[in-house]
Amino acid sequence: MPQVNSLIGFLDSRSFMTIWYWLALVGMWSATGRSIMGIPSDVVARARAALAAGQGEDPSVLTLLDWLSLVLPRWRLGATEGAVFLGLTSFGLTSLAVLGFVFWLELAQAMFLLLIPFWLLFWMRVRLARRVAPLVDAAQLGQIPPDKAARDAARMMTWHRRWITVLSMISVLTTVLWGSAWAIMHPNGL
């Protein structure tokens, strides 16, 4: 166990060589893949199946719209909240990038590689919420039929899930390659 005498000594701990880092990476992506904006993937799949079978009045279609009406408000960011969140998270990620890739601190590199894809994922979810919210609002006001709103929302959510899969594969591959390169360059942790 390395002795921690300073903050820099703590930040230089062995991240890529611990099983906990890799378990956290796989666990975070596994948990992320089970839902779309907090809506279970099977709810979207059942609604898509019912709509493909021509059952627009199926309870699974209305269940999807109910889920969306409950989940979408927490993904709505106003201009002020979005700017503040973007500024703070960009500062944090830039700090980690500088500490990791300029000062070569392993923990900062590991945290940057772990957090940057989830930062992108957050903004993808906000964008999806902005695209789906008008459909749900129009269906609630009776301007469009619920089955059309659910069909369009389920289609967008399915594409979003595919992009999450691509992002997760790129993220894990990049992290594995960089972690392996780090382990080869620093076999004794120095």
Image (tube, rainbow, N blue to C red):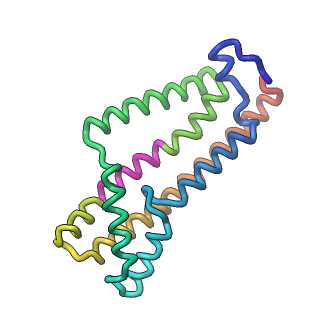
Q: Is residue 111 left or right of residue 158?
A: right
The segment highlighted magenta reads 119-131
Please provide percent x and percent y for residue 130: 30, 54
The quadrant in which residue 177 appears is top right
Seen as rendered, the residue at the extreme right is 188
Give x and y (percent) for residue 135: 26, 65
Picture quadrant where residue 187 is located? top right
Residue 64 lies left or right of residue 40; in this view the side is left
Give the image location of residue 93, x and y in percent: 49, 31
Front position in the image: 83 or 146: 146
Residue located 43% across and 33% down the image: 89
Q: At x 23% / y 70%, what residue is drawn? A: 139
Q: Quadrant location of residue 30?
A: bottom right
**Residue at 33% in and 32% down:** 84
Up the image or down, 150 lies above or below 15; here it is: below
Residue 185 against residue 140 in the figure, above or below: above
Which residue is depicted at the point 48% across and 64% down?
40
Q: In what quadrant of the picture does the N terminus appear?
A: top right
Magenta segment, principal secondary structure?
Answer: helix
